[in-house]
Amino acid sequence: MIQRFSFAQQFFAVSSTIPEGRVLLAGGLYPLRGSRSAYQASVACYDYATGRVVWHFDRTKSYPFRAVAHTRGVCATILPQNFVRCPQGMFRFDAQSGAPISPDSDVRGWQLEFLDATAEAFLFSWVCDATSLLRAVDARGATFEQRSFPYRSTSGGKSIERVIAAGNETFVAVFSLVADDQVVYSIEQWSLTSASPGWEKRTSLKHVVRNGSVLMLWGCSGPNLDVEILSIESGNALTSCRLPLADVVSIQPIDTDSYAVLSISGAYIIHAASRSVSQVAGIGPSDFLDFGALAVDSSMGKLIVVTAGNHQRPGTHLLVLDL
């Protein structure tokens, strides 16, 4: 049975699942032009086990949230840009009630788009004055650790794109740079105190998702999906392949070998070992709006698809499908 739910807001991101069959959504309203009162940042908790909204928080006169994660019963969101003299950075909420948690983690800069969580803290990165920075914020406290990287975002240097938790002490940082007149990406393993990366891997694949002890790098090239899987410990390539999937917008792991894929044409499951692709029933091109994200609940055998409209047709459709 397919479950469908609609929101008036544009939800651009969905978290990994929370026990009791829930996910967190981040977004708002982004009309592109008009008065500040038309803009809104929103975060919500949706219970797909019962088909209801548990709580919903709106911040008016604000640009939308763009990323969401959770740990230790806390929800965190990223606000990558805002109006002049308005805060941007990371904001926290109680995952059960939606109550805001102070203090906010304000920062100044750009390239602030992604968020990840360890067992104890939230990680996010940004660029300020040509310096790439990372901050690790305690989930419920006010303490945080911060570091810069020995790169400059000028004259062909590296700019941080995102960070991915790799353990309690290590993380993977994704940097962009220009080489031979092309944008490439440097995937690097770091710690909060290391002077240089443990390993570095150059790739043309922009997107990265963690699956246990490996990273899946992916990107679309015409009608195909290019995939490479790396060891987090060593950075060594374990496998690579090209699959007949176009216009992919999100990939999330199901188990050690299989991944859920959302594209404009529908939802799919890929198996890395056999390099096979199968389609998930219940969603097709007519269901996709303009933005998409997904979460996987392997224990319940569910795929949660979130697709939002653009500024001319705001709103979000949420579908719960059987894997």
Image (cartoon, rainbow, N blue to C red):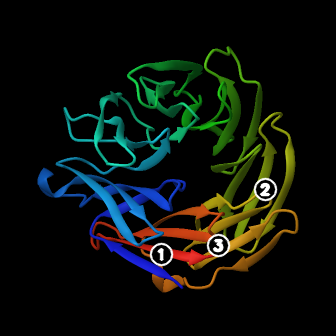
Residue at 74% across, 39% down: 202
Observer-nearest of 132 and 153: 132
> Is the Cβ of the residue at disc 3 closer than 8 Å to that at disc 2?
no
* Mark before the other along the chain sequence, 1 or 3: 3
Report helix, strand or loop for mark 2.
loop
User: Tag 2: Cα neighbours inside 10 Å, few (<14), some, or many (≥20)?
Assistant: few
Question: How far across and down, in percent of the image, does residue 168 sit?
Answer: 65, 28
Residue at 55% across, 32% down: 159
Residue at 32% across, 48% down: 97
**Quadrant where the C terminus is found in the figure:** bottom right
Report helix, strand or loop for mark 3.
loop
Residue at 74% across, 75% down: 244
User: Which dot marks residue 246?
Assistant: 3
User: Tag 1: Cα neighbours inside 10 Å, few (<14), some, or many (≥20)?
Assistant: many
Report the Cα–Cα distance between label 1 and label 2.
24 Å
Observer-nearest of 318 and 182: 318
**Residue linked to disc 2:** 256
Type of residue at label 2? Thr
Residue 86 lies in quadrant = top left
